[in-house]
Image (cartoon, rainbow, N blue to C red):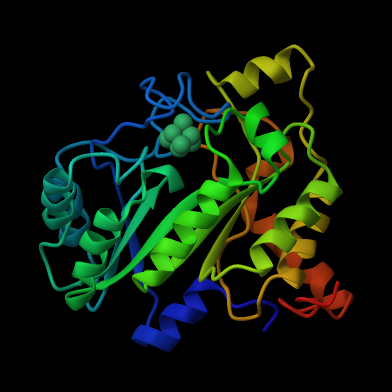
């Protein structure tokens, strides 16, 4: 096994792969509404990282997936768009409950920002673990605070560190999102981020390849030549660096980006994620590398 991927984890835990129901929970984001910032992160599209999700209320979104389910199929209810802990507790409870309408939902996954994690939010999320498994996904993207400013992330890395600590105190597994290829970042920053994460109680990781999507600030930077995405090989080498330096126990949820259909401006190599994953696998095999083989060795 080159790395501990999510399907393998699902098979160990549930005896089968779980399917994901991506949900637009109707939330907004403090980095867009002026509370923390305006305009959002420079790569974020209009729908807050969930452009493919078809609308409707939460229960209808889930019910559509359940109606189309194959025999024996079970699910992760994934609150994806925008910041899914950014509301009053009573609203959060109502929206999470609206997804848990069937025992075939085995997991509730909540995507959010670390500056929207509080003890009260943790307590609420942890309370669902009696009924389903839970995990929280935090968009770190980079551990480098200088890059964080350039991408308009709107919080410092120490805020992420505190959120991870708090979530761990409530035994809530954390999935961290990274983006490889952010403006001004090269190998040094990737190494810094990998080192930072290797010292933290991170349960899962999603590595996204950067994509320049239509209508974003990043697209303007690309058009004015302020920004150039990495080459496919630079991407591949960075991913391998991260994989070999994180804990072998971390569950690898994703190794590529997923630009919504018709939105990709660059890089071209981002169009074929299966080929990209294949190249990462081949390179790791040929170099005799495994996830975590250099963990804590530097
Ligand atoms: S935190 Fe997420 S939803 Fe908010 S602007 Fe950044 S990418 Fe978009």
- When asked about the image quadrant of residue 166, the answer is bottom left
Residue 231 place in picture, x, y as percent:
83, 41
Residue 272 place in picture, x, y as percent:
65, 48
Number of marks in the rendered image: 0
Taking the view exactly as shown, the residue that stands out farthest to the right is 287
- When asked about the image quadrant of residue 88, the answer is top left
**Residue occupying image coordinates x 17% and y 48%:** 89
Residue 196 place in picture, x, y as percent:
69, 60
Taking the view exactly as shown, the residue that stands out farthest to the top is 224
**Residue occupying image coordinates x 45% and y 55%:** 163
Residue 269 place in picture, x, y as percent:
73, 42
279 vs 62, left or right, is: right
- In the picture, the quarter occupied by the N terminus is bottom right
The residue lying toward the viewer, choosing from 223 and 187, is 187
- In the picture, the quarter occupied by the C terminus is bottom right
45 vs 269, left or right, is: left
In this rendering, is residue 285 above or below 177?
A: below
The residue lying toward the viewer, choosing from 159 and 178, is 159
In this rendering, is residue 71 above or below 228?
A: below
**Residue occupying image coordinates x 66% and y 40%:** 210
88 vs 79, left or right, is: left
The residue lying toward the viewer, choosing from 80 and 152, is 152
**Residue occupying image coordinates x 23% and y 39%:** 87
61 vs 263, left or right, is: left
């Amino acid at each position: 096994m080159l790395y501990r991927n999510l399907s393998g984890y699902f098979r160990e835990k549930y005896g089968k792969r779980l399917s994901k129901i991506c949900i637009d929970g109707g939330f907004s984001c403090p980095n867009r509404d002026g509370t923390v910032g305006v305009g959002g992160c420079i790569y974020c599209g209009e729908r807050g990282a969930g452009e493919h999700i078809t609308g409707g209320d939460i229960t209808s979104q889930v019910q559509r997936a359940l109606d189309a389910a194959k025999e024996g199929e079970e699910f992760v209810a994934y609150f994806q768009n925008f910041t899914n802990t950014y509301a009053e507790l009573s609203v959060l409870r109502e929206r999470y409950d609206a997804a848990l309408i069937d025992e075939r939902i085995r997991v509730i996954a909540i995507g959010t920002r670390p500056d929207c994690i509080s003890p009260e939010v943790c307590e609420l999320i942890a309370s669902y673990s009696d009924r389903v498994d839970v995990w929280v996904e935090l968009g770190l993207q980079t551990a480098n605070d200088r890059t964080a400013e350039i991408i308009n992330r709107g919080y410092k890395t120490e805020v992420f560190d505190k959120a991870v600590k708090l979530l761990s105190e409530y035994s809530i597994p954390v999935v961290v999102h990274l983006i490889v290829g952010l403006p001004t970042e090269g190998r040094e920053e990737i190494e810094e981020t990998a080192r930072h994460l290797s010292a933290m109680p991170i349960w899962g990781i999603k590595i996204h390849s950067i994509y320049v999507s239509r209508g974003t600030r990043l697209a303007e930077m690309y058009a004015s030549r302020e920004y150039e995405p990495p080459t496919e090989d630079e991407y591949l080498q960075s991913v391998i660096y991260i994989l070999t330096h994180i804990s072998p126990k971390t569950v690898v949820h994703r190794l590529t980006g997923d630009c919504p259909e018709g939105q990709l401006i660059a890089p071209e190599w981002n169009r074929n994620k299966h080929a990209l994953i294949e190249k990462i696998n081949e390179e790791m095999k040929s170099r005799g590398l495994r996830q975590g083989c250099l963990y804590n060795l530097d």
